[in-house]
Image (spheres, helix red, strand yellow):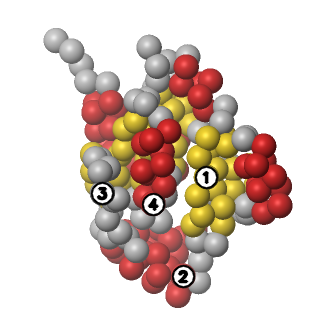
Amino acid sequence: MRGRFIAIVGPSGVGKDSVMEALAARDPRLALVRRVITRPGDAGGEDFEGVTADEFHARAAKGDFALTWPAHGLHYAIPATVADDLATGRDMLANLSRAALPAAKAQFDPFFTIQLTAARDVLAERLAARGRESKDDIARRLDRAEYALPEGIAAVTIDNSGDLDATVQGILSLLYPVRA
């Protein structure tokens, strides 16, 4: 059985990485896709591979990536090696841009999308706490929080305004329902 490519999407500050890490820690059927990003590797936040723009483009030209997209002045990629993980039957969690969903859906089968949401004040507090953006940057990110999913993309929406454990349990119940 082939594993599912599970895209986790939502606005900045919604807790995508925290939710994904907690999911993978709680259930061995899930693993994280380590993205490649054109930002310094010591920038903090998620576990990612930081590369220069030149290295990114050279690797993309060699076919090292299954999926690429630009966002917020950076370039992001899903390594082509994710296909090997999926072939073993393991479900893979990937933090994606909502704009990258159509390309991901075309690339991966089976494909599943979880859209995380949170109240605007919760997002603002989380963005300020991580200390990576200016007040103007935070305001711009909050204005994008309601960005709609692309046409043809179905998603299950989960509110992550509250307790992380409740969010994780809700997602695990959705992904692996108990069969009577």
Residue where numbered disc 3 is placed: 151
Residue where numbered disc 4 is placed: 99
**Foreground disc of the pair 1, 2:** 1
Specify the label residue 137 is tagged with: 2
Q: Position of residue 97 (x, y in %)?
A: 49, 58
Pick whichever of labels 1 and 2 is earlier in the sequence: 1
| CA–CA distance in space, label 4 to label 1 | 11 Å
- In the picture, residue 23 is in which quadrant? top left
Locate residue 146 relative to residue 41 in the image: left or right: left
| CA–CA distance in space, label 4 to label 3 | 10 Å
Query: Which residue shows up at 48% across the image and 45% down it?
Result: 104
| CA–CA distance in space, label 1 to label 3 | 19 Å
Q: Position of residue 53 (x, y in %)?
A: 78, 63
Dot 3 amino acid type:
Glu
Asked if residue 46 can be seen in this view, the reply is no
Q: Secondary structure at mark 3?
A: loop
Query: Which residue shows up at 21% across the image and 15% down it?
Result: 179
| CA–CA distance in space, label 4 to label 2 | 19 Å
Q: Quadrant of the C terminus?
A: top left
Q: Residues within 10 Å of mark 2 (few under 14, many from 20)?
A: few
